[in-house]
Amino acid sequence: MTDRHTEDEAHKQIAAAEEAEARDRATGAASLFDLRLVIGGLLGLYGVVLTVMGLFASGDAKAKAAGININLWAGLCILAAAAFFLAWRALRPLRAEDLPDTDSDRPKVE
């Protein structure tokens, strides 16, 4: 009787661990492939580079752009776009339930 009880307990623990692992895998995959983070990060990187170039621009570079420090303004606009994407990701994170079910031929496992 003790062996049967131990075996049942082990099956319950294994089932609980597998369920938790599947839940973690689903939510991790959803946040891993969130393109908003990639887009926001790249825009942020390019925006910082352009803003720094604009801050240290020479008079000749400004004269070429009709007296406008185009690198500075473009960098600030790109940084604003990066902030938008990163805020969007932070305020509305992806969840596994939000992802469309693309495998219609596979049976649903509940």
Image (tube, rainbow, N blue to C red):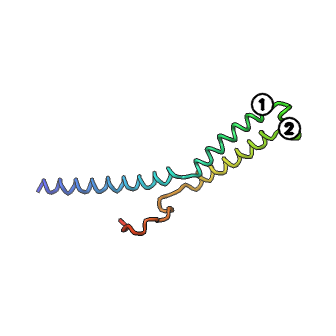
Q: Going by the image, does 36 lie left or right of 73? A: left
Q: Position of residue 63 (x, y in %)?
A: 87, 36
The amino acid pointed to by label 2 is Lys
What count of labels does the image hold?
2
Q: Going by the image, does 102 lie left or right of 76? A: left
Q: Going by the image, does 15 lie left or right of 85? A: left
Q: Going by the image, does 98 lie left or right of 109? A: right
Residue at x-position 86% and y-position 31%: 59
Residue at x-position 29% and y-position 57%: 15
Which quarter of the picture shows residue 57? top right
The amino acid pointed to by label 1 is Phe
In the rendered image, the quadrant that contains the N terminus is bottom left
Label 1, label 2: how many angstroms apart (C-alpha)?
15 Å
Residue at x-position 88% and y-position 39%: 67
Q: Which of marks 1 and 2 is in front?
A: 2
Sort mark 2 into few (<14), some (14-19) or many (20+) by Cα contacts within 10 Å. Answer: few
**Picture layout, residue 25 above or below residue 51:** below
Residue at x-position 20% and y-position 57%: 8
Circle 2 — which element? helix
The numbered disc on residue 56 is 1
Circle 1 — which element? loop
Query: Label 2: which residue?
Result: 64
Q: Position of residue 50 (x, y in %)?
A: 72, 38
* Mark with earlier residue (1, 2): 1
Sort mark 1 into few (<14), some (14-19) or many (20+) by Cα contacts within 10 Å. Answer: few
Of residue 100 and residue 105, the one placed in the foreground of this image is 105
Q: Position of residue 87 (x, y in %)?
A: 63, 50
The numbered disc on residue 107 is none
Q: Where is residue 53 in the image (x, y as percent from the top left)?
A: 75, 34
**Picture layout, residue 2 above or below residue 66:** below
